[in-house]
Image: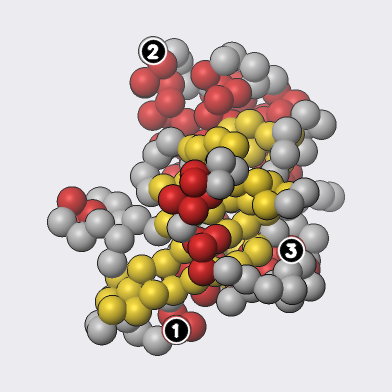
Amino acid sequence: MYDSERLTRISENWFQESYWRTEDKVVGEASGRGSVVFVRHEDHNWVLRHYHRGGFVGRFIRDRYLWRGIEQTRAFREWRLLSELSERNLPVPVPIAARVRRFGVSYTADLITGYLSNTRSFESILDDGDACLEQWEIIGRTLRRFHDQGVNHPDLNVRNILVDGEKRVYLIDFDKGEIRGAGSWRHGNLRRLKRSLRKVALETGTAFDSHGWRALGHGYQPAP
């Protein structure tokens, strides 16, 4: 599946990391679970991600998922969600293309999205001690925008929040994300983010930034 307004054709090779490396068009890569590389296609930079399993199951099954129909695959669901969010003018990567390969009762999946230039993860900003209260508040306001439109990001963490040079905030990695009605899931997203922030503080040997968290909460409050 691909965006026909951005592409006139699509190649199977584009979903192979080895192809981009052979063509010397890998311009970067991201750490963490899964395989994520930044590639150059003509005048555009893309992000290629191969879906990997996490948790206990991921120790034994690297990248296979149970087949439940094409529309229930990880790549197609995330592609369609990103397309919807882009149409709503929410700050997310543009979906470019998705691929699913079926192997009987299992499948593997890949996703290509547009690259968000001049951005850093909030984790990187925290590590460098560059987070100011204004930035925390902007993040809170951005999260509120998503939640007001019913966007559930179940893996909201400091790596999935990107900030550009103009302090604009983006959310990435919407695997398992969905649009749903109001509910306790909103608080679940925020609790997940707070756990992520505490983990960063523990890993870096710094104190949890309670002032920053209050500023985020202030930004998250609905407009009067």
Seen from the viewer's position, the closer of residues 132 and 20 is: 20
- Residue 30 in percent (x, y) is at 49, 38
| Residue positioned 82% across, 31% down in the render | 166
Q: Report the amino acid beneath label 3.
A: Ser
x then y, percent, for residue 20:
53, 49
> Which residue occupies the foreground of this view, 178 or 14?
14
Residue on which the image places disc 2: 205
* Inter-mark Cα distance, 3 to 1: 22 Å
Residue designated by label 3 = 86
User: Which label's residue is closer to the chain start, 3 or 1?
Assistant: 1
Q: CA distance from mark 3 to mark 2?
A: 38 Å
In the rendered structure, which disc, 3 or 2, sits on the residue that comes first in sequence? 3
- Residue at 38% x, 29% y: name it: 199
Of all residues shown, which one is farthest toward the front?
22
Residue at point 73% right, 33% down? 118
Q: Amino acid at mark 1?
A: Ile
Q: Identify the mark nearer the N-term, 2 or 1.
A: 1
The residue pinned by badge 1 equals 70
